[in-house]
Image: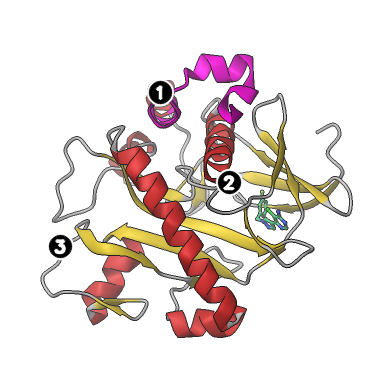
Amino acid sequence: MPEAGVHLGSGKVRELYALDEARLLLTASDRISTFDVILPTEIPDKGRVLTGLSAFWFARTSDLVPNHLLALRDDGRTLECRRLVMLPIEVVVRGYLAGSGWKDYLATGAVCGHALPAGLRESDRLPQPLLTPATKAESGHDENIAAATAARLVGDGLYGEVERVALALYRFAAAHAEARGIILADTKFELGLDSEGTLVLGDEALTPDSSRFWPALGFAPGGPQPSYDKQYVRDYCESLGWDKTDPGPEIPAGVVAGTRARYIEAFELLTGIAFADYLADPQVVLR
Ligand code: Q0Z
């Protein structure tokens, strides 16, 4: 990777580099994970779809909260970012009852201390979006925590600001997506503080890897919903009877092509931009 600087860390499918004391590079690969395992087969352009979507949302939400984006590189998969001091919590907003939120509701009737009406079904829309913070676990298995616990970790005043910003971002993005046939069931934000102590949105934002996107067409609460992007891969993996431990299976070309098409469809619906136009000039998502 040229002009990348010192490698700071690897996520499941992304890499983080230092450019200098004040700037980082975030680069998204075409790797895909399912059931928490990175598969040996890549989805061509997946990293570009995710990076383009992040940059699109950063450009459109900067009046809600400042963000770390400095520049989008012409490779379409790399963001130059301001270096922040990240908060020690995952900031999750849920508009629908899925994943660990559904599990917590089944067990306790509440999600992260937010009491909910009885009788909700899996994937039901919540009466209002909820901030459901989680700890950052190295394993990647974040644990939901009560608001009071999160407030203790970051400070009461700052937690109030985190809540306001995260709910505003979710409401904006969910309304935008819904008007384009996509349900934003939930999403995870990573926030940090800049050198002046201002709260800033960092990492990736509102991508299929940090969010649950569901097709609005066919939405049917009462069970899990198909993932907008990964469902072909999941269905193929399930059809093999794979035990979901590393290593994962190779994915056949037809399933790769179908999955790539779904990522690109999500990009085009959400941004209103042809993906070919993004490849020709990634800066189109910033205008
Ligand atoms: C993001 C991560 C990845 C591994 C740290 N603007 C920022 N300032 C300081 N730290 C971060 C950011 Cl985005 C930061 N991560 C997550 C991303 C690979 C870890 F691509 N960790």
Q: Residue at x 61, y 78 (%)?
A: 154
| Pointer 3 or 2: first along the chain | 2
Query: Is 276 in the magenta?
Result: yes
Q: Which mark is residue 274?
A: none
Judge whether 195 appears above or below 49 on screen: below
Under 8 Å from ligand 1: the CB of mark 1? no
- Mark 3–mark 2 Cα distance, whole angstroms, equals 35 Å
On the image, numbered disc 2 is attached to which residue? 62
Q: Position of residue 191 (x, y in %)?
A: 60, 61
- Residue at the disc numbered 3: 121
Residue type of the residue flagged with mark 2: Ser
Drawn side of residue 187 relative to residue 175, left or right: right
The residue that mark 1 highlights is 261
Mark earlier in primary sequence (3, 1): 3
Regarding mark 1 in the picture, which secondary structure is present there?
helix
Q: Earlier in the sequence, mark 1 or mark 2?
A: 2
* Magenta region, main secondary structure: helix
Numbered range of the magenta stretch = 260-287
Q: Does residue 118 appear to the left or right of 16 in the view shown?
A: left
Which circle, 1 or 2, is nearer the viewer?
2
Whether the residue carrying mark 2 lies under 8 Å from ligand 1 is answered with no
Q: Residue at x 18, y 43 (%)?
A: 219
Kindly report the distance in space between the C-alpha atoms of the residues bearing marks 1 and 2.
Answer: 29 Å
The three-letter code of the residue at mark 3 reads Arg
